[in-house]
Image (spheres, grey):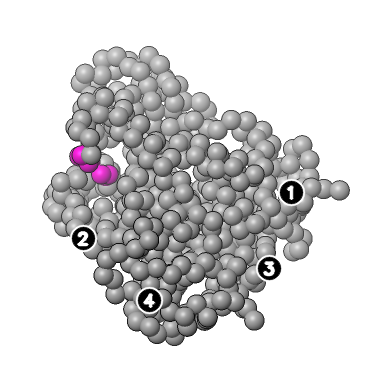
Amino acid sequence: MNETFDVVVAGAGPVGLMLACELRLGDAEVLVVERLTEPDMTIKAGAINVPTAQAFYRRGMLPELLDQQNATVQRIRAAGMAPNTAGQRLPIVGHFAGIMLRTSEIDFDDPVFADLGPGAEAVLVAQQAIEAILTQRAAELGIEVRRGVALTEFDDDGTGVTVHLDDRTVRADWLVGCDGGRSTVRKLAGFDFPGLDPEITGHQAVVEMTGAEGLRPGWNTTETGIYTTGPTPGRILTVELDGPPADRTTPVTAAELQASLRAVSGVPVEITAVHSATRFTDNTRQVTDYRKGRVLLAGDAAHVHSPFGGQGLNLGIGDAVNLGWKLAAVVRGDVSETLLDTYTAERHPVGAWVLDWTRAQVALMRLDQRSKALRAVMIDLLATRDGATAIFKRISGVLHRYDLGDGHDLIGALAPDIELSDGSRVGTHCADGRAILLDLADSAELRTIARPWSDPVRIVTAKPIALHKLSAMLIRPDGYVVWAADSGEHDGLDEALRRWFGHKS
C-alpha cells in the first residue's frame, strides 16, 4: 500500500516550506520532497518586501526575522558601509536598475505607509535566513520533509495524483511544484511557459579578492556593463549585456568571476577565494495557468525572471500564502475546487507585473545611446521626492492588492494592522492560520451572522486604540480584506463568508 497524503509539495526552498506550513495550519497532511540533501546556501535574494514580512509576522515569526536583520545590519556597519548609529535607517532602501533609492528622498508620511504595523520593520533578511526560519517552523508543525529524494514522474487520474519518487511511490490528493525555474513538475505536467529569451549574463558572488581598491561601492555603470560591490563584505555582482552564457549548468569558477569583474569594471582585481556564486540571466517566462488538474505550481516553477530588485522571493512567498489556505480548505471539504480558480486569477497578474518590472530594468541597463538617455532621465526622476517615493511604494509592495470586486476601499488590500485597546494588534490574532472577522463596534448582529463559520473564521471583538472610521472587516488567512464596513451596516457579509469559506447551514 502506498503512503497517502493530502498534498505532496515538490521543493523544500522558501516557497515550498512556506506553502507546507500554511497547509499544515489548515489541517492538511503534507509531504515535502527535495532532491538536495542540504539547503542551498548559494547567494540569492538579500531582502524582503512588506507583504512578505507581514506574512511572517501574522504567523508569529517576526522575532526571527528581526534577529536575522539585526545581524545583517551589524555586518554592514562593521564594514563601514552604513552609519553606525542604533535606530538610524540605512541610507539606501533599494534600487531600480541599479539607480539607488535614498532613504532621505522617501516620503514615509505618505498614507500608504500608515497602519503597516511592526511587520514592516523587517527588510534586510536574506533568502537563506528565510529558509532556515521556515525549516524550523516546519519541524515545529510536524511536517515531514524528505531530503535527497527526487520526484521522477507522476500520474494525475482526476481523483488524485500518484507521485513516483526515486525511492518509493506515494499517493496524494494534490501535487504542488515548488521546485524552481527548471521545475520537473512543470515540465512533466506540460504547462505552457511562454516568455522572452535572455540577452544578458549576470554573476553574483561572495568572494575574497585583492586589488579591489579601484572598485567603487554600490552600483556602477561602465562602457562595458554594470557591477556592484557590497553592501555586505565580499559581495559582488556583474552584468554583461552581450548575450546569455553558453552554459548555465557548469559550476561558477573564480576565473570566470574575475574575468567578468575585470571586463565591466576595468580594475585588475584578483579573486582568491569564492564562498558562494551563481550565474543568472534575464530569461522571463510565466505559465498561463497555475493549475492543471490536480497539479499546481508556485514560485519560480510558475515564473522566472532576472533577480534585479529581489522580487522573486517575495513573489513566491506571495504565491504560497495565497494558495496554502485555499488548498487546505478544499482538502477539508469546506469549499469546492472552484476556489482554486482564484489562485491563478489573483497571482498571475502579480507575476506578470514582476516580469515587466524586471524587463524594464534590463532595458535601462543597456549600453546603447537611447537607453543611456532614458537612464539619465530616470536618474533625475529618482533623485526627486515624488519619483523616489513612487518607485519605493512599488518595490516595497505596499500598493499591491487583488481585484476582489467592488465595495469598500479596503477590499482586495492587505488588512491594516490596527492597534487594539487590549494591547494586541490585528496581525497578532492570525498565528493559527484562520480567517479573522474584526468587530470594532461590538455588534451582536455581526457575530450572529458569522457564527456558522466559527471554525474557519475567528471573531475578534475589540476597540481600536485610536479613532478609526472602520467598524468591521473580514480578513482571509493570507491577510487580505474581502469585506469591510465603516458603519453598523452588514450588507454583503453573509455573501463574502459564503464565497470564501463555504456554505454553512
Q: Is residue 135 above or below residue 438?
A: above
Point out which mark residue 333 bears: 3
Could you classify mark 2 by the number of other residues whose Cα lies within 10 Å: few (under 14), some (14-19), or many (20 or more)? few
CA–CA distance between discs 2 and 4? 27 Å
Tell me which amino acid carries mark 3.
Answer: Gly
Residue labelled with disc 2: 110
Residue 489 at least partly seen:
yes
Residue labelled with disc 1: 163
Residue 282 at least partly seen:
no
CA–CA distance between discs 1 and 3? 22 Å
Could you classify mark 3 by the number of other residues whose Cα lies within 10 Å: few (under 14), some (14-19), or many (20 or more)? few
Q: Position of residue 43 (x, y in %)?
A: 43, 32
CA–CA distance between discs 2 and 1? 50 Å
User: Which residue is situated farthest in the right direction here?
Assistant: 1
SS at circle 3: loop
Point out which mark residue 441 bears: 4
Question: Upstream in the sequence, badge 2 or badge 4?
Answer: 2
Could you classify mark 1 by the number of other residues whose Cα lies within 10 Å: few (under 14), some (14-19), or many (20 or more)? many
CA–CA distance between discs 3 and 4? 32 Å
Question: Upstream in the sequence, badge 1 or badge 3?
Answer: 1
User: Which residue is situated farthest in the front direction here?
Assistant: 422
At a point 52% along the width and 42% down the height, the residue shown is: 134
Left or right of 34 on screen, residue 276: left
Between label 2 and label 4, give the one nearer the viewer.
4
Q: Position of residue 150 (x, y in %)?
A: 68, 38
Tell me which amino acid carries mark 4.
Answer: Ala
Magenta extent:
88-95
Left or right of 168 on screen, residue 395: left
